[in-house]
Amino acid sequence: MIHPSAIVENGAIIGSNTNIGAFSYIGSNVVLGDNINIFPHVIIDGHTKIQDNANIYPNATIGMAPQDYKYKDEITYIEIGKNCMIREHVTIHLGTKSGNSITRIGDNCFLMVGSHVAHDCSIGNNVILINQAALAGHVIVDDFAIIGGLSGVKQHVRIGKHAYIAGMTAVEMDILPYGVVKGVRRCYLTGVNIKGLRQRGFAKEEIHLIRDIYMEIFDGPSIEIPIRAESLQKKYADNMKINTLLKFILDHPERHLCLPNEESIIK
């Protein structure tokens, strides 16, 4: 059902059983899937595609121009996967030509109140952004990561699978898969996300092995982390979960990682 006060521009594609609430606006290049529930006062514009079963709450704004001086009204895109929950005052911006021309959000993501996804971000499946978390441009967030409330992530940072970022954390460097980080001014790695891995069905032996690998990775000068990761990759070539961790390092060995400090349990 489309409320009489809602504006749906000509050209917009609306799936079956999709509801659009009062005073919402749907732009002419928007594609909405089936069974989407759009609450009142939502704006969806630009070349935005949202797949089935999304819930989009009041005052969310999706598909507006990116906050980038280089953007000159060129055609860029947003794609949002299935079963996403987008709460009040969330903002998701279009991509830019200087990036990938697209901002992507995967399936089953939960973007809580006031969270922000900037241009050219790529978010995997089952990711949670807690209230007021903000991703700058070109950030990559892998599956099952959780970004704590009031945290800020610097542009171009990568966040690995199953990582957990504590609330009010300033993230300036890449976060390894399975890691927990915190820090108001500069984040540091506190250990392995044991609770999160348990909740997602990792066996005790797998968690212990991941923790052991962490200790080996950080046992020595940080400049030698890629060398140690390469050695470990040969040893654990058949272990997919360990290779997820090691591949994150070896795919971009030149990048800076968030490191442990003297308080970390892995040191």
Image (cartoon, grey):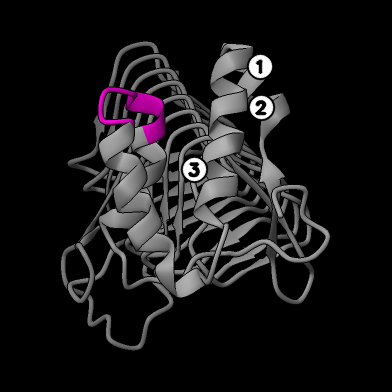
| Mark 1 or mark 3: whose residue is earlier in sequence | 3
Residue type highlighted by circle 3: Pro
Which residue corresponds to mark 2?
196
Q: Are marks 1 and 3 in contact (CB under 8 Å)?
A: no
Task: Between residue 62 and residue 231, name the one nearer to us.
Answer: 231
Judge whether residue 110 can be spotted in this image: no
Please count the marks in the image: 3
Which residue is painted at 55% across and 27% down in the image?
209
x, y percent for residue 227:
34, 61
x, y percent for residue 215:
60, 47
How crowded pointer 2 is (Cα within 10 Å; few <14, some 14-19, many 20+) is rated as some
Q: Is residue 35 left or right of residue 28?
A: right
Element on which disc 3 rests: loop
Judge whether residue 152 can be spotted in this image: yes
**87 to 250, vertically: above or below:** above
Which residue corresponds to mark 3?
177
Q: Which residues are magenta?
A: 236-242
Residue type highlighted by circle 1: Gln
Which residue corresponds to mark 1?
199
Q: Are marks 2 and 1 in contact (CB under 8 Å)?
A: yes
- Whether the magenta-drawn stretch holds residue 190 is answered as no
x, y percent for residue 110:
57, 33
Q: Is residue 136 left or right of residue 182?
A: left
Element on which disc 2 rests: helix
